[in-house]
Image (cartoon, coloured by chain):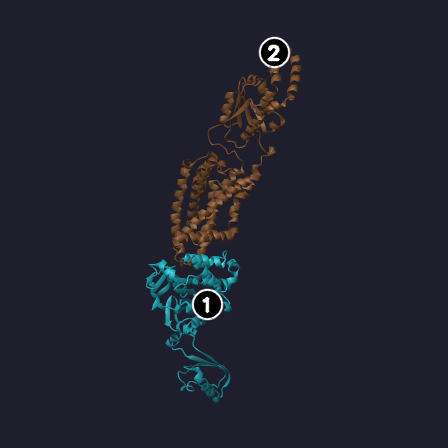
Chain colours: A brown, B cyan
Amino acid sequence: MRGSWLIIVKDFTRRARDPWSLLPILLLPIVIGGIMHLSFGGIERGGMPRAVLLLADEDEGLGSDIFRTALEQEQLADLIEVKEVTAADGRAAIDKGEASGFLVIPAGFTDSLVAGHPIELRLVRNPAQQFLPEIIEESLAIVVFIVAKGALVFEEPLQAIHEAQTGTGTGDFAGQTQEISSLIGDVLAQCEGLLFPPLVTLQIEELAGDSSPDFPISALFFPALIPLSLFFLADLSVRDTIREHNRGTLHRIMTTPTSMLAFLTGKLAGTLLLGVVMFAVLAGLGSLVFKIGWGENLPELLVLVIGYLIAAAGIELMIYGFLKTELSAQTLSTIVVMLMGLVGGSIVPQQFFPPILEKVKYISIAGWVLQGFDKVLWKGATFPGIALELVVLTGCGIVTTLIGSRAMLWKLRRPAG
Amino acid sequence: MALLEVIDLSKSFGETVAVDDISFDVEEGEIFGLLGPNGAGKSTTVSILSGILTPSRGKVVLAGMDVVHSPLAAKAMIGVVPQEVALYDELSATENLSFFGRLHGLSGPRLRERISSMLETVGLGERAREPVKRYSGGMKRRLNLAIGLLHQPKILILDEPTVGIDPQGRVRILEVVRREAESASTTVLYTTHYMDEAESLCDRVAIMDRGQILVQGTVHDLKMQAGQKDVVKIAGSFPDEDFASTFSDIAGSKVGTVKAEEMLISVDDAKGALPLIIDRLTSRGASIRKVEVEEPTLETLFIHLTGKELRD
């Protein structure tokens, strides 16, 4: 135990003295995440498709006219294409994923607006899309705010127009218009009315099913790249074990009262510790650089990372234990790391996987850990929710570590070279 | 009393027999040399003695303990200086010493005192905090030696500790080993293929080749055992005649090759016989330009035993 601890301390000191060996691994998610952020993260209007909003107007009055006119203003029209539908057609279309959002303006909307009664609008978002529903939601929030405040400010003129349109007024429309104009002028002078609570509120409904993340695209790429970095770290640590063997420091350690098992345990425990530290650093950098929120379930993420590190170290032990030379093992290791990353969703996030890759990802430990990440980060899963991922990763870790350690111990006990 | 006993030791790697049934013992306080060319099996023997390799057959007993059955207890008594410079380049001399000292169970003031003492002994005190990667080859070798001595082992095993360093560094290392053996009564097992090192340092020597021990004993005994004689090498011009009977009255004399300009004569005692040899040759018309006397060495003994040079 003491021997293992001394090995861990020694390796941490070595890493601290020569941090350059870890820097590329640490920078990998930052650099690739940064490139992805620059490539896809910024929403540029010219390059973005317009969000399609299905609008079912069951009111067909002054209020819904104002609402639709606001949505068709030049700036919003660049972002949103409004298609009028019936409520039934709209629901069917959004269920099929044919639009980004579906808004129902209920019957009686104008009456309530003019009368100053609270009204609720219902927006249905398409969960299969990531950013377009976000645009609709944000835009509608603004429109709702303007309409609600406007209704308060222009309460009297609106009432007059509404009465004129519905024929419930005095019948003198020209006189009413004059009256409205003068009232508008009066009301404009009383803009403090904007401080009143809104009459109209927007309620968002997210359809059941796989939801899309709410944050920028780097928030997808960056966490996905972390397993790739950690796999490379496992490769580096196990390769260091072989190098200690080849350079004679391991044999020197073996001339002290330290067993080979204690040495290997120290190396593996050091890998886990360093991996956890690296994850913490990367998580911090992710928050700092890409504004990624890691949520409240950090213990779940940490346990997933530890399970993944055990599995990664086990696979590396097998590679370096069974292959004869360091060079051939390093080559195979790089291929395995990249393939596992690619298939598992480190390079192309699982959210973009076609159906075929959805199945194939399960052959990769990166696939399992990223599925766990997805559940914890974006669906708020706790330990019961990621039990399957933990069992698979830990099970894989135990089996590969047992086989790999055996091969490695056999190799390390032989003379180097 | 033998501190280390090696009994019928063998080690094979697949078909290759690296050590073939060797036996020797090392007395407490002596410096024992294991001499042989590269590939003779010295390093494999050292690895078994250090507990790194397990023997295929035979046993190693250190202070009454079987090294294979009680490896950790045995290792606590052994200090090993490996052939390769086994250091962590990123760490300083102090950190390297501290790490290996702690593995040997040292800690606290005792560890600090031993580190300071060893740095002084090998002359690295002033650069103790520099990363080892900035050291010269000789400095690394000295630190390599210091680590082996740090925990004051009962037996110090040095595997070719002077390979690849300059003569000055070599002398310094040999001095440290000699001093340690004398002042701390440390028993030393020293492997080398430099016969002059073995001759100047070792009380007893075993000569190895192809995994086997060919001979062992004191340097003097070995020379006598092999019937080695002094060789007188004379350069000049010699009359064309048989000189075999010319020196027949000189003890142990034998005339070797006689070429037109060189004659080799082996005798028991060259110093005593030299005036007589020169006198007889000149009286027969020989013209002598140069005379050299070669006393027997371990190298000549090795050549005598194996028919090849030690550095092959």
Report if the CB atoms under discs 2 and 1 are less than 8 Å apart: no
Position in image of residue B192 (x %, y %): 43, 67
Crowdedness near tag 2: few (<14), some (14–19) or many (≥20) residues, C-alpha within 10 Å:
some
Which residue is more in the foreground, A130 or B135?
Answer: B135
| A168 on left or right of A260 | right
Q: Is residue B135 visible?
A: no
Position in image of residue A247 (x %, y %): 46, 58
Q: Which mark is residue B176?
A: 1
Which residue is more in the foreground, B25 or A50?
Answer: B25
| A152 on left or right of B203 | right
Position in image of residue A132 (x %, y %): 55, 30
The number of numbered badges drawn on the structure is 2
Chain of the residue that carries numbered disc 2 in the rendered image:
A
Q: Find disc 2 in the rendering and name its residue.
A: A169
Q: Quadrant of residue A305?
A: top left
Which residue is more in the foreground, B172 or B161?
Answer: B172
Which residue is more in the foreground, B27 or A152?
Answer: A152
Task: Report the residue at 61% width, 21% height from top.
Answer: A153
**Where B187 falls versus A121 (above or below)?**
below
Dot 2: what SS? loop
Q: Quadrant of residue B70?
A: bottom left
**Where B178 falls versus B108 (above or below)?**
below
